[in-house]
Amino acid sequence: MNLTPTNASSKPDSVYFYGTCLIDLLYPQAGVSAVHLLKREGVNVIYPQAQTCCGQPAWNSGYRDEALTVARAQLALFSKPIPIVVPSASCAGMIKVHYPELFNAQPDKSKALDIAERTYELTEFLTDILNINLTDLGAPVTVAVHSSCSARHEMKVADRIDILLDQLHNVTHAEPANKEECCGFGGTFAIKQPEISAAMVLEKAKAIEYTNAQRLIGQDCGCLMNIGCALEKQGHTITHQHIAKFLWDRTGGPHRDN
Amino acid sequence: MKINNARNNILNRLKTSLKSESEPVAHDVPDSLDWGVDDRLLHFNKQLQAANAEVHDATKDNWLITLKHICSTKRLKNLLFSPATPWGAQILERSYEFPTFKHFDYPIDEWKPALFDGIDAAFTSTHGGIAETGTIILWPDTHEPRLISLVPPVHIALVEKTEIYSTFADALKTQNWIKTGLPTNILLISGPSKSADIEQTLTYGVHGPKELVIILV
Amino acid sequence: MTTEFRKHIQHALTQREVQANTKNVVNRLRNHRRAALSDQADWQRLRRQSTAIRTHAVDKLPQLLELLEDKLTQNGIRVHWAETTEQANQIVLTIMQQHNASFVIKGKSMVSEEMGLNHYLKAHGIECLESDLGELIIQLANEQPSHIIVPALHKNRKQIARLFHTYFPATPYTEDINALAQSARHFLRHKFATAPVGLTGVNFMVAETGTLCLVENEGNGRMCSSVPPVHIAVSGIEKVVEHLSDVPPLLRMLTRSATGQSITTYFNMISSPRKPDEKDGPLEVHLVLLDNGRSRIYNDLELRDTLNCIRCGACMNHCPIYKHIGGHAYQTVIPGPIGTILEPQKSGLNLYGELTQVSTLCGACREVCPVSIPIPKIINRLRWEYIRQSACNIPGAGSGKKKTEAIVWKIWAWSCVHPVVYNRIGRTITNMRSLIGRILKKISAWTAVRSTPKLTKTTLHERLKALKIEDK
């Protein structure tokens, strides 16, 4: 079965795309770009319209019953044995790392484990499974990257975004100080502990500003929104963009959107 | 009475807790490093010097000259050592060439004030060294009690090159500490006393010796 | 609502000098550790080894404690057990009284901080003097340690210079770190020589040999444990390891993780009081084993990992939150990520439950932990226990339950399992985005330092439908 991702050398024909709620409401272009990128590589994309949220906000807040209810509804969406691609390491991490914990004592545990096994973060999928080759068509630009903590510590795929950007010869990659440090988003943390979150994001924004990059790129819209909005509020011109949109715009797009 | 209860209560709670079988300790970290004598010496030297210790290379024949040199360079007025050890006996033999020698052959309570006030330096033998970390091993005993390597501002220690092990684990195993049985006190010393409690900036000689001087033979 | 706890954090964030001092030291410690553990494969192997040693020791805790007690007793060290800090304090007091001692010189011990020993003894007319340079600084300043390894890291040399000048007026004012350390040496030397009792913590206790191990750089730990005629060591029950051969790997990981040192200046292994033919060392050695909730934590296999901790402090050094708010804002004995999981379990979620909210779950702590404690996972678990009525034996479980919050999550979950509702809400939000934007602008928690996020006109659901992306 070349549909299953277990054989990494073979390209799957089809994948599920799990868009995430932040992208749904705030950054749909990122989701559309990701779908374009996957399709350009010859992969058929299935987007279950019944998808909502992975359940992470409740899980991280201690509301396990609610997280379970929501997660269970997502389990029902992925019946075919094909990869699930998620354009967010945070949501991918929820499915891959935390569903097995969440469903640990549940009757549908095996289903959760199966889905966890099939879940990939987008940049991980593009590099490790699709071995994507990119040709840069864009103008010279300097970008700073913020890899999310989920990408770094949970999914362990933080370097994939660098691998992708390295393929773009007109893109200069600037490294912010303390790049591995959390930006202070943390989902509900930003609202529950606004003072600490503010201190953290301001430090992060300063480090990014200091790189003189024109754009901030990342694989998680939560962090991007946090840092990007902070940069904007401080009056900086650095724009923020999800890696999928950045890649698509420079290598094939721009497609019509907004 | 109450204390006994505490013991039993704690142990009972632990014993009635859920059991979990942990995996056996992995053995993919070797106890020793594949270093020859020269490598061990080199690392031992390098680490000790990096820790601000002085290391002097000598031989079993000429080490007394090295010691004499150390005493005169540091202008030591006196030297505390035990004449009862083989090395100490050699110093004693030629004591006329050394600063006033001090020795305490009675329990600490009688020499505490003298030890804390008025000793310039102490000489001790060692139980070997550790190359990886630049460490000397001391097994204080009746002749060389533990405080003489701690209280005087200068500690001079003699290490035999053949007794330098690659790692702590190596020393512990090769010297067979378990079978020998542990003495009252074992000390691993890896430099002069230091602290980085203020701004993570190193300063030496906080409570222990300000200087650690090693003579290698 | 701004809780007491939030107020402490808000206050901490205004302490510019403390913040700068903390960041400075934390960055140095991070660099030191990185230099010492740069080889990833090596680090992974060492970590597996240390983790296995600690997990094994903790799993066999009751047997190892009995073995330890046997061996120590054979060696002549007296073992005392305390279920509570109150009992532990009483034990120390009784020993002091037996020797008519009114003064104790102390080496660094976080367990004595946990016991509140200094206050307790003071109330009974006994003077405690800290001898670790960092601990002395905070004792003179009448503060608590803000870090478990570098207790005074929140203070810079100027503040310490002023402090020393006040307390040691004979010594001239100086900001020279060497001179400051020397004035502490000078002040304490006489105290070591005359103290009737010395008290220290313990880093490892070896069951098979009955040995207490102390790790330090200054020599004050050696002074406290070998100059006075009586030595009292205090330790949590979890600090035991089974074999002597377990010590070298743990020591290696402890010092590298803590300060990047390959070893500390002194590693002191104490296996007995002074023997008849020996000339120095304490005539009596006592070990006080403190439980204080540890055996309760032990009963839960997931929470039990908390007890693996070897107190290296790497988690706080690498925690972005600790770096910003400093140790005092936590209001606990042990701050930082390990404190965040340990203190609520020990003292109750009713007291420290809010601490569980002070984490982005970024995972930096887990990444650097030399014994692989899954701190974010345990924080997540404690958040669950904080808001539910459960059979779990953590004191104060359920104390964080809020009715309105619970209802919000119920509604959220309901909408998420009804895609039609969810999408309708999504469409409503995006249709009313200018209004919602204005409402969002009012959430000052977000907009104090950030602009308002821009809602999209058409959701991803709608766009992909329009692009005729397969649904099933």
Image (cartoon, coloured by chain):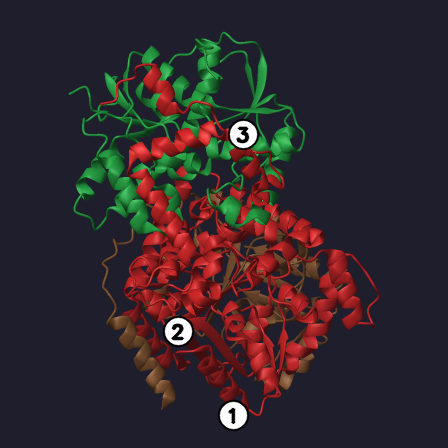
Chain colours: A green, B brown, C red
Q: Residue at x 64, y 63 (%)?
A: C134
- Determine which residue is flagged by label 1: C98
Q: Label 1 is found on which chain of the structure?
A: C
The tag earlier along the polypeptide, 1 or 3, is 1
Is residue B179 placed above or below C442 in the rendered structure? below
Real-space CA distance between mark 1 and mark 3, rounded to the nearest whole angstrom: 76 Å
> Would you say the residues marked 1 and 2 are in contact, meaning their CB atoms lie under 8 Å apart?
no
Q: Residue at x 29, y 50 (%)?
A: A65
Type of the residue with mark 1: Gln
| Observer-nearest of C110 and A242 | A242
Asked if both marks, 1 and 2, belong to the same chain, the answer given is: yes
Q: Residues within 10 Å of mark 3 (few under 14, many from 20)?
A: few
Quarter occupied by residue C168: bottom right
Q: Label 3 is found on which chain of the structure?
A: C
Q: Secondary structure at mark 2?
A: loop
Asked if both marks, 3 and 2, belong to the same chain, the answer given is: yes
Q: Residues within 10 Å of mark 2 (few under 14, many from 20)?
A: many
Q: Secondary structure at mark 3?
A: helix
* Image location (x, y in percent) of residue C465: 32, 19
- Determine which residue is flagged by label 3: C434
- Determine which residue is flagged by label 2: C291
Tell me: C56 left or right of B216.
Answer: left
Choose mark 1 or mark 3, whichever is in front: 3
Type of the residue with mark 3: Ser
Type of the residue with mark 2: Asp
| Observer-nearest of C427 and A97 | C427
Is residue C62 placed above or below C409 in the rendered structure? below
Real-space CA distance between mark 1 and mark 2, rounded to the nearest whole angstrom: 24 Å
Q: Label 2 is found on which chain of the structure?
A: C
Image quarter where the N terminus of chain A lies is: top left
Q: Residues within 10 Å of mark 1 (few under 14, many from 20)?
A: few
Choose mark 1 or mark 2, whichever is in front: 2
